[in-house]
Image (cartoon, grey):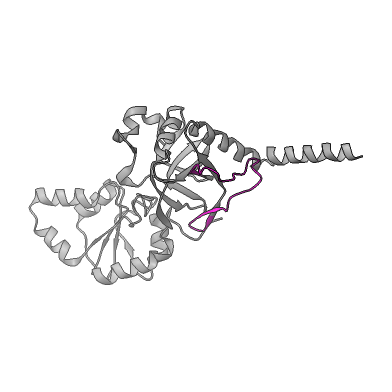
Amino acid sequence: MNNGKNFSLIVQEFFNKGKNELKLNWEAIQSGKRKKLFPEFPYKVKPAVHIVGKDDYIKYQEFPERRKQSYLKRIFREKTAVVLGTNGIVFSDEFKAAAVENDVALFVTPLSKIECSKKIKRMLAGFLPDQVILSGGLLEIFGLGIIIIGDSGVGKSESTLELISRGHKFISDDVTLFYINENGVLCGAAPEASKNHMEIRGLGIINIKEIFTDSIIKEKAKVNLVIKLKRWEEGKQYDRLGLKFPKKYEILGKKLPQIIIPVAPGRNIALLIEVACRVHTLRKKGINASLDMVNRVNHLIWKQRK
């Protein structure tokens, strides 16, 4: 179900929604109508709209030819969706040609640059996507998006590295950018600064893409399960049957199932994480080995009492 945010908003929809309030006129031959207004999401949520004010255009007209070409190349770059002229600017033919050539929408409004900026910000406020950066790594294991969290120094990165070496997909390490996609589904991606990288004690920062090749990297993934690694506490009673389910983990209003794995020396954490993923998949199908065992024992006790 969509949460009302629409960062897949395209130029044609932006024009339809804003043509009256912004008093827009579409110049040239309506190029760029299918371009996305948020092309760099989830890394950036700034709309790809470049506003050209009256003073900006006067300066452009005074540029020598070489500098004009450089200016046009800069504002009509691939990631620009809309170039918007304010104060009723009458764009030159070369400006219009650059818009068509680079498939960028060219709009004109009688409003001032400041007034136009405020109206666009207000108009798009309801379309900006929800996102948050939180501690925790994200892998795709057996087709499931798995968040790995836990105590500092418990072995999260080392376990992640072992899982990657087994062929599971790497999205992010240590911190993850979470967001709600256009279908209302919680997804995760690596923040731009740490993309493709991990920190391993004793080795420092390593580049996963360079070590394991592109095939192991995934840009983003739907989030299905949280696995928390918790340091083993001597004398503490742990649930041995798997009948107790931890409180669900919440991100951006979405509640996720959580499995807690106690970590002790000698335990193969990567293997336990893989098994936890299988257990989660089986539970989703209604198969619960713990309950099956309890029911079997109860049935045997009942038979003996008959």
Using the rendered image of the protein, determine whether residue 107 is visible from the camera's viewpoint. Answer: yes
Residue 189 position, x and y percent, is: 41, 45
Q: Residue placed farthest to the front in the image?
A: 235
Left or right position of 72 against 259 = left
Q: Specify the quadrant of the image occupied by residue 89.
A: bottom left
Left or right position of 96 against 268 = left
Q: In which quarter of the image is the C terminus?
A: top right
Q: Specify the quadrant of the image occupied by residue 9.
A: bottom left
Q: Which of 213 and 232 is in front in this view?
A: 232
The residues colored magenta run 228-254
| Image point (31%, 70%), residue name | 118
| Image point (24%, 68%), residue name | 113
Q: Is residue 72 positioned above or below 295 on the image?
A: below
Magenta span includes 230: yes
**Number of dots carrying numbers:** 0
| Image point (34%, 32%), residue name | 209
Residue 281 position, x and y percent, is: 61, 39
Magenta span includes 281: no
Residue 242 position, x and y percent, is: 64, 42
Residue 265 position, x and y percent, is: 47, 34
Q: Nearer the viewer, residue 33 or 159?
A: 159
Characterize the magenta stretch by its predominant secondary structure. loop
Q: Residue placed farthest to the right in the image?
A: 306
Using the rendered image of the protein, determine whether residue 288 is visible from the camera's viewpoint. Answer: no
Q: Quadrant of the N terminus?
A: bottom right
